[in-house]
Image (cartoon, rainbow, N blue to C red):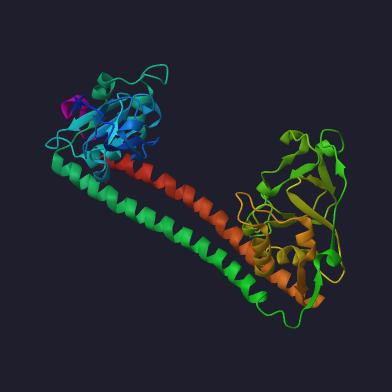
């Protein structure tokens, strides 16, 4: 990194502190840990001394530079925050006092997130374990302008970082609002069923039966669909599904034709149902409906399975076990209501349109998020070159 600021080794401004205490079994201790990729120091846990096997520990002080011996090469370092003052770490961490007359701890914290600093750390040693020693840390170089300039740089970075985070928050809120709009639309649509016809699910659709062996062709080359590849509450299929042979499934699976509606019976509160445009095999945790009554549109049937009336019914019957589920007889007994076919089509068109908007907003959020994530490193690079 070219910079107009003079470079200095860290040993000019930080000092290794290797003071240890003996853990008392009757006392309570905070333990902290470093997050990777220079994401800071966080609380690991709060435990009694009796639970700590290694009785020789170090006590962190607020504002110190904490470096993990093992994880430093992947960004395992940071500044001890106020709420972790007094937390303990093992001898596999190095604690450095910072001379605050030469080096601002926030300045060091931000510089630690730059590619220039991380390249120095990752270049030390050929292995991850024990590759970083205190002398390595003390030998890293850092642009070291006067303290007043360091404070100015920190203030400028914090100002720009706040704007980046605000932009990220606005994007996130927009996506959430569009998602809430879809849920609200579902609630409104199914709030008045007074003029709708009603029939039990068993008269509206037939579940597929008979298992196939997913290890043999042609079934091995069909998509394998389970609840994990269905989105919650959207009626959409994730793109992460695999072929049966790629998933390594060996138990029997159910063959379903293209156009089937699938419903995940595990954890009904997740509201997972999809209409699948291709032939495939599904797991036993999924009900597949392949013959749907002409009185009901297949996509309306699908949306009905994630609409409030059925979700409330399924949650009530599925129990409070670790993995609640609705069984087939309970599902088939549900009285499903539906309006005339033209009204169903209008509802489906409307909900599909909302889902398209949600998908577009999520894609934009992901794209913008990547751009925002790239902004802070660019800001840091300019800051330590003296260009802010």
Indicate left or right for 223 with 40 as reference: right
Q: Is residue 138 visible?
A: yes
Of residue 161 and residue 332, the one placed in the foreground of this image is 332
* Among the 4 quarters of the image, the one containing residue 191: bottom right
Q: Residue 100 at x, y = what percent? A: 14, 37
Of residue 3 and residue 11, the one placed in the foreground of this image is 11
Of residue 371 and residue 250, the one placed in the foreground of this image is 250
* Label total for image: 0
Taking the spot 69% from the left edge, 49% from the top edge, the residue there is 227
Indicate left or right for 257 with 274 as reference: right
Q: Is residue 385 visible?
A: no
Taking the spot 18% from the left edge, 31% from the top edge, the residue there is 97
In the image, is residue 121 above or below residue 33? above
Q: Which residues are magenta?
A: 4-14
Q: Is residue 12 magenta?
A: yes
Q: Residue 146 at x, y = what percent? A: 14, 38
Q: Residue 173 at x, y = what percent? A: 47, 62
Which quadrant, please, contains the N terminus?
top left
* Among the 4 quarters of the image, the one containing residue 240: top right
Indicate left or right for 217 with 364 as reference: right
Q: Residue 289 at x, y = what percent? A: 82, 57
């Amino acid at each position: 990194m070219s910079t107009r600021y003079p470079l200095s080794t860290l040993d000019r401004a930080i000092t290794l502190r290797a003071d240890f205490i003996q853990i008392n079994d009757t006392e309570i201790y905070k333990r902290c840990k470093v997050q990777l990729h220079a994401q800071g120091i966080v609380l690991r846990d709060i435990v009694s001394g009796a639970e700590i096997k290694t009785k020789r520990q170090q006590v962190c002080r607020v504002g110190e530079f904490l470096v993990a011996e093992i994880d430093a090469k992947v960004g395992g370092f940071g500044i001890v925050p106020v709420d972790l003052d007094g937390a303990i770490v093992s001898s596999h961490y190095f604690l450095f006092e910072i001379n605050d007359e030469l080096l601002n701890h926030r300045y060091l914290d931000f510089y630690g997130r730059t590619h220039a600093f991380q390249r120095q750390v990752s270049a030390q040693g050929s292995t991850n374990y024990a590759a970083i020693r205190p002398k390595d840390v003390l030998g890293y170089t850092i642009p070291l302008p006067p303290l007043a300039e360091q404070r100015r740089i920190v203030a400028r970075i914090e100002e720009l970082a706040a704007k980046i985070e605000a932009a990220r928050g606005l994007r996130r809120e927009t996506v959430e609002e569009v998602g809430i709009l879809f849920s609200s639309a579902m609630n409104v649509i199914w709030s008045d069923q007074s003029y709708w016809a009603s029939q039990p699910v068993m008269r509206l659709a037939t579940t597929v039966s008979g298992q196939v062996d997913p290890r043999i062709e042609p079934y091995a080359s069909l998509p394998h669909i389970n609840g994990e590849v269905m989105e919650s509450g959207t009626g959409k299929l994730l793109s992460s599904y695999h072929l049966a042979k790629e998933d390594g499934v060996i138990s029997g699976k159910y063959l379903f034709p293209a156009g089937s509606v699938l419903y995940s019976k595990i954890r009904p509160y997740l509201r997972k149902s999809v209409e699948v445009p291709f032939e495939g095999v599904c797991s036993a945790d999924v009900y597949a409906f392949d013959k749907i009554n002409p009185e009901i549109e297949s996509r309306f049937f699908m949306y009905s399975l994630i609409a409030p009336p059925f979700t409330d019914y399924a949650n009530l019957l599925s129990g409070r076990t670790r993995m609640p589920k609705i069984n087939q007889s309970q599902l088939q007994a549900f009285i499903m209501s539906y309006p005339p076919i033209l009204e169903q089509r209008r509802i489906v068109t409307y909900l599909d349109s909302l889902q398209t908007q949600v998908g577009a907003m999520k894609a934009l959020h992901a794209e913008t998020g990547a751009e925002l994530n790239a902004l802070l490193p660019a800001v840091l690079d300019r800051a330590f070159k003296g260009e802010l």
